Structure formats: structure tokens, C-alpha cells
Amino acid sequence: MTTAHVVDLDLSGKTALVTGGGSGIGRACAERLAAAGAKVVVVDLQAGPDTIVTDLSDLDAIGALPAGVDVLVNNAGLQVVSPLHEFPDERFSLIQKVMVEAPYRLVKHVLPHMYERGWGRIINISSVHGLIASPYKSAYVTAKHGLEGLSKVTALEGAPHGVTSNCICPAFVRTPLVDKQIADQAQIHGISESEVVEKIMLDRAAIKRLIEPAEVAELLAYLCTPPAALITGSSITIDGGWTAH
């Protein structure tokens, strides 16, 4: 697909913070916000250019991150694929910390600045699994459902202060996280990796291809524009028709 920006967005003078911004969806979002003129703070577990290296499972470390943020993108996440009765407890807890508690702490951290300025955009990168479930992903599905709830409460409280909060709910996006899932699913189901993409990942999608990170980033950009000011508390799917069933 073309990487040309189709959404007219000017974030000059604003600061954006993107978690998990070192690769995949997060990197695409960080690059798109920077192209719109924002000063972008990237938070990631791995070191990179202009990256604040932070382990978001260390909840106390979140207080040291910048609070003067106008656009918050809660994107960081991880996936473990395992039957529920065999699911490792410590991994379940880790996923809740990184994908629910850390976003809560970050929202709480940046809201005072947004309230003071009378404008803010909180965009949570959720998933179709924030709306529906799949087997073998108990921790991820639980966390994404929790993120959806947090986003809606944030929307209700932020509305009088010019702050919107929304979830973007993609199906499978072409990222390193998905690449790892392909291998895990192949092992669990005893099929080839190509069959995982065709028979599991794209089975319910009407449009049979993986989503590109830039497509998610462009939807995020729209949610920061003036015409999107009344979109809040929403869960917007970009899933090739997956949830239309």
C-alpha cells in the first residue's frame, strides 16, 4: 500500500507519547505523529533512537516518564498462546500489568496536563480480541477487554475537559508480534505456518490479507483531527470484516 498520508493533521506544538514505539504498530504511529509535527516520545523495552527504555511491567517506573503529553498512544503489548489449563500464571500477570495497569497509570499520569490545556487525545491500540475471543489467548483477551473498559471510563471523565479516548481494534497486523504467533499457532495446531495465516488468522476475515501498520497509524491520525472531536468512547475496528460475522 502507499505510505502517503491521506489525513490532514497538524500537531505542531504538541507532544505525543507512544508505548511500544520501537517496532510494528507503535513505530508506524510514532512516525505518523512526527510527520504531523508532534514532538514524539517513544517508550520501549528495547533501546533505539530517541527512545526512553522502560519496562512497563515496573509500574513505579511510569511516574518518571514525561507527563506533559497531549497525545497518548497505549500500544505496548505481548502475547502468549497456550491452553487455559496450562497457561503460565506469571505470564498471565505480566500481560495484565503491561496491557492494563500500565495504560491506567499512563492515563492517570498525563490527564492533568491535558485537562489544563483543554485538549487531549488518548488512543488505545486494542484488538478485535478486545471485542471477541479466540481460544488459547486467555491473558491477551482478558487484557484487551480491560483496556476497552478503561478507555470508555476515560472518555466519560475526559469529555468536559476536551479529552477524547478511543480504542482502535485491528485484526492481525503484519508485525513481529504476529510473526511469533504464527510459529506458536503452527506448533499448537500441528500445521504449517502458511496454513496458520490462511486457516486461522484470516479465516474469519472477508478481506484476506494482513493489515499494514501504516493503515492503523492513519486511523490514529484521523482520531487526532478536529473532525473527529466527537468520536470518543468508541471501539473502531480495522479488521477486514472479521467482526461482521
Image (tube, rainbow, N blue to C red):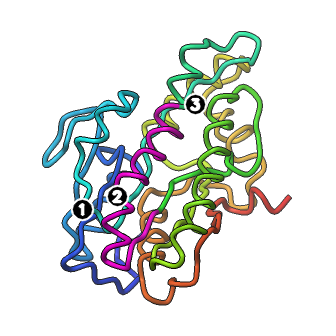
Disc 2/disc 1 C-alpha distance (Å): 6 Å
Residue segment shown in magenta? 97-122
Mark 1 surroundings within 10 Å by alpha-carbon count, few (fewer than 14), some (14 through 19), many (20 or more)? some
Q: Is residue 162 left or right of residue 157?
A: left
User: Residue 35, image x and y in percent?
Assistant: 24, 72
Magenta-span inclusion, residue 182: no
Q: Which residue is mark 1?
A: 68
Mark 3 surroundings within 10 Å by alpha-carbon count, few (fewer than 14), some (14 through 19), many (20 or more)? some
Disc 2/disc 3 C-alpha distance (Å): 35 Å
Q: Earlier in the sequence, mark 2 or mark 3?
A: 2
Q: Nearer the viewer, mark 3 or mark 1?
A: 1
Disc 3/disc 1 C-alpha distance (Å): 38 Å
User: Residue 201, image x and y in percent?
Assistant: 68, 42
| Label of residue 110 in the image | 2
Magenta region, main secondary structure: helix
At label 3, the amino acid type is Ile
Q: Secondary structure at mark 3?
A: helix
Mark 2 surroundings within 10 Å by alpha-carbon count, few (fewer than 14), some (14 through 19), many (20 or more)? many
Whether residues under marks 2 and 1 lie with C-beta atoms below 8 angstroms apart, the answer is yes
Q: Which residue is mark 3?
A: 182
Whether residues under marks 2 and 3 lie with C-beta atoms below 8 angstroms apart, the answer is no
